[in-house]
Amino acid sequence: MNSTNTTRKPQRVVALTGLIALICVGLLFAALAASINTKPYMPPKVAQKYMEEWLIESARSVAGEVRLKHVQAIEPFYLRRDYQPVWMNSYELTEAGKELLQVLRETAADDWRNYGYELSTLERETSRLSNIPKQATAVEVLLTDAFITYAKQALSSELLPDTGEGDHPSIRKVSASQPGTSVSEEQIVELLSDSVRRNELEALVEKLTPSHQGYLKLRKELNRYLAIANSGHWYPLPDDLVLKPGERNRLVPHLRWMLSQYGDLQKGALSWLFRESEERTRAPGIDEPHDLNRAEFLFDDNLADALRHFQSRHSLKATGEIDPQSLIWLNIPPYQMAQKIALNMKRWRHLPRDLGSRYVMVNMADYSLQLMNGNSVELDMKVIIGNLQRRTPVMSQKISMLELAPTWSVPRRIAITSLLPKIRRNPGYLEEKGYQIIGRVNGVDEYISPYAIDWKKVNASNFPYRLVQKPGDDNALGSIKFLFPNDKDIYLHDTSQPELFNLDKRALSSGCVRVEKPRLLAEKLLRGQGGWTRANIDSAIDQNRTTRIRLQDEVPVYLMYWTLWIGEDGTLQVRDDVYSRDLIAGLPPVNPAVSL
């Protein structure tokens, strides 16, 4: 009996010891996990100490190099908050801080101007954030300083590209008080304070930035091309490279890498498992030994399909072969592509946040028009835009009226430069094309016969007439005019030269937008409006009966210029910069269409 008890006692001790050891190990792992998941904390007094240092003592050398631009507005803001951060949570960026940094990055990426965000310092300091109060508070004040700069630019319409062009002088006088409104630092700080108080700081950053899906989708492509540029692996293909499917070349692996990086060559589902994928995308140097019989040097069908995809989204002929035109687009440096993407993102700032449930969208660079109904394309057609001397301006308006069988009051500039030489050669030209001459006789407007005028005495400085073209097949405006209010006399209209829509490059008008399917567009816009069926529309036009119809519900129309955008299939679409508006560092890049 005693022997049994003696035996059990050590067993209990061993079991108890093991249990205690197990608990200790568990507690150790729990403590370790807790320490890993516990975020370092910056006490308020510590934050206050360094915030005061940056804002009062070292405002001229934050992070060792940056002079704060708005310290006079920032210091009172933080004083009211006892110098506590708003963009940092101890040693980490808040969601609002991350969003602001992303917005600053994409706004400045086009190098269109010096934006003043001190982005290189911000990127450096945020990339190496650690548990150092002085560094974290430096990031805080730099972000606030950059936010005020950015907000001032956004609210004062300073971030709008494609403005100030003198192609179309205003036909109305603009008062001195009309141009862009300036916003003060104090107003922005008040807006910032209010948003912090309401816990809506991230929402404030978002409100100052386009929220359209087209903008947000370009953000992904911007990050893609910045990553390619920073990879150090990109280099251009030789200008004289000619390559067809089935051929072999030492540069095929690099072409494969380029198309993969651009998103045209899809990686296999298990490609990450195999080192072969790396070998297939690294081209040997020109003096490096290589065996062209290896599979990676073959321009195979998959690569040809990827090249066709690339060519299609650049509006090139999809041959699947490397040709001079394809090489030009393949060899645009990724950093320059990132700049172009960022600038096209900025173009979304021309548009209201709510585009409307139904609207007309014109993309000049694509020579296209879409009537949108929600997220669906109700109608799609080609357009002709202004020529290089009379570029179609960017606009955001509402179509308020249609004119069927319109007359055309010829602008004086066109009458003098385009029509007068023809009239001098043949005064009968006016009657042949349906023009009427209106002149002042004894202070009254009267129609004048073209044969009653000595055209030899008429010139640019002596042209006291107005020309009006009657409705008909020769009318320059065609069968319909779509009117929307603007001070540059720009509108959509039909054309008497529909054969021009067969051309690929259609920058041919004097500034207005000519549409390919005007009657169908009119039918869609007048849908459900007082008896204006397609038959009635056709009848008024065919009888040359000039008729103005005011839309019961005005339809927004947006004349935009996007050389890059995300298509319906989710791919990046790229077009020629026909108007040389893609400014990079103040200079237009080489236009691929011109450089050949």
Image (cartoon, rainbow, N blue to C red):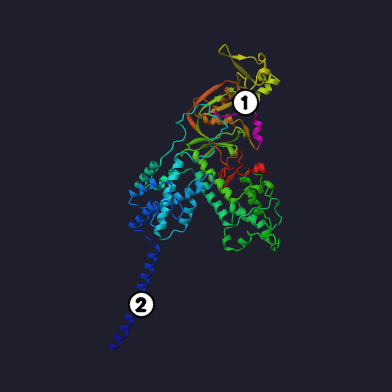
Instruction: Report the side of 1 relative to 445 (left or right).
Output: left
Is residue 494 rendered magenta in the image? yes
Is residue 330 rendered magenta in the image? no
Query: Which amino acid is tagged 2?
Result: Gly
Residue range corresponding to the magenta coloring: 488-503
List x then y, in percent, for residue 429. Answer: 68, 20
> What secondary structure is found at the residue carrying circle 1?
helix
Residue 367 is at least partly visible in this image = yes
Instruction: Report the side of 5 relative to 441 (left or right).
Output: left
- Along the line of sight, the residue nearer the viewer: 378 or 63: 63
Q: Which residue is mark 1?
A: 414
Q: Where is 332 relative to 356, above or below?
A: below
Instruction: Report the side of 578 relative to 53 (left or right).
Output: right
- Along the line of sight, the residue nearer the viewer: 295 or 221: 221
The residue depicted at 57 percent of the width and 58 percent of the height is 269
Query: Which amino acid is tagged 1?
Result: Ile
Residue 1 is at least partly visible in this image = no
Residue that sits furthest to the top in the current view:
442
**In what quadrant of the picture does the N terminus appear?**
bottom left
List x then y, in percent, for residue 348. Answer: 51, 41
Q: Nearer the viewer, mark 2 or mark 1?
A: 1
State the CA–CA distance, disc 2 to disc 1: 99 Å
Can you tell which quarter of the image residue 168 is in?
top right
Q: Residues within 10 Å of mark 2 (few under 14, many from 20)?
A: few
Q: Earlier in the sequence, mark 2 or mark 1?
A: 2
Instruction: Report the side of 194 relative to 243 (left or right).
Output: left
Res. 18 mark = 2
Can you tell which quarter of the image residue 523 is in?
top right
